Image: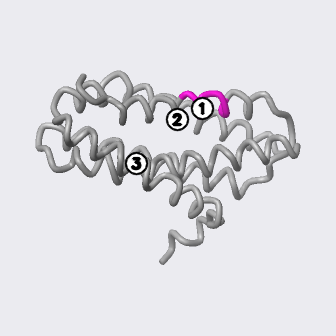
Amino acid sequence: MTDAKIFERLKADHERHRDLLDRIDATQGDSEEREQLFETFRVEVTAHAASEEMSLYATMLGKPDLRDEAQHSVAEHKEIDDLLTELYEMDFASTGWLTRFRTMKHRYLHHIDEEEEEMFPEADEALSAAAKKEMAATFAKEKPKEKVKAAAEEPSSEDEKE
């Protein structure tokens, strides 16, 4: 592992996401805490996913032996994004909200476990040190911009109908 900084950075984000998921899961009803934690998670995960796609996935898509894994993960990002939008639009106090949240939590944990256990080791082995260094720089540059963008945008399922 010559320059695994990109993978360390992604895993550090995942750890923050796991913590936020557990904290949200422990909230009750339409509390300010639930709404704030969920919004923090939504913005963080949205920015993380977009930046990951611009850095790691864009590189992996260019490599035939890594392309399928990258495409699979992009599809999972879309699924998580759809669930986040659905949760954002739901009544935070409804019993259905927590049930739906736990579905999203399960899907997201599956996704990041798969990345960490399968995709990252394969990409680390297959990509050059220079490519990994470039991906880390791209991720570091894009994530703050994507966080601002995610915080400014209100998710809506209405956008899907364009």
Q: Is residue 16 magenta?
A: yes
Task: Give the CA separation, mark 1 to mark 2.
Answer: 5 Å
91 horizontally vs 125: left or right: right
Q: Give the CA separation, mark 3 to mark 2.
A: 12 Å
Q: Where does the magenta region start and end?
A: 15-21
Foreground residue among 101 and 153: 153
Q: Is 81 part of what is drawn in magenta? A: no
Residue 137 location (% of width, % of height): 35, 47
**How dense is the environment of label 1, judged by Cα within 10 Å: few (below 14), some, or many (20 and up)?**
few
What residue lies at 24% left-to-right and 22% top-to-bottom? 1
Q: Residue at x 44, y 35 (%)?
A: 10
Pinpoint residue 100: horizontal percent, then vertical percent: 66, 41
Per the image, the residue denoted by label 1 is: 16
**Type of residue at label 2?**
Asp
Q: Give the percent coordinates (x, y) of residue 4.
A: 31, 29
Q: Where is 135 relative to 85, above or below? A: above
Circle number at residue 158: none
Q: Nearer the viewer, mark 1 or mark 3?
A: 3
Instruction: Please give the name of the residue rendered at 64% of the width and 66% of the height, measured from the top-left corner.
Output: 152
Q: Which residue is mark 3?
A: 139
Q: How many marks?
A: 3
Report the residue marked by disc 2: 13
Label 2 packing within 10 angstroms: few (<14), some (14-19), many (20+): some
Circle 2 SS class: helix
Q: Residue at x 43, y 48 (%)?
A: 140
In the displayed image of the protein, which residue is found farthest to the left?
A: 64
For the residues labelled 1 and 3, the Cα–Cα distance comes to 16 Å
Secondary structure, mark 3, is: helix
Residue 158 found in image quarter = bottom right
What amino acid type should be assigned to the residue bearing mark 3? Phe
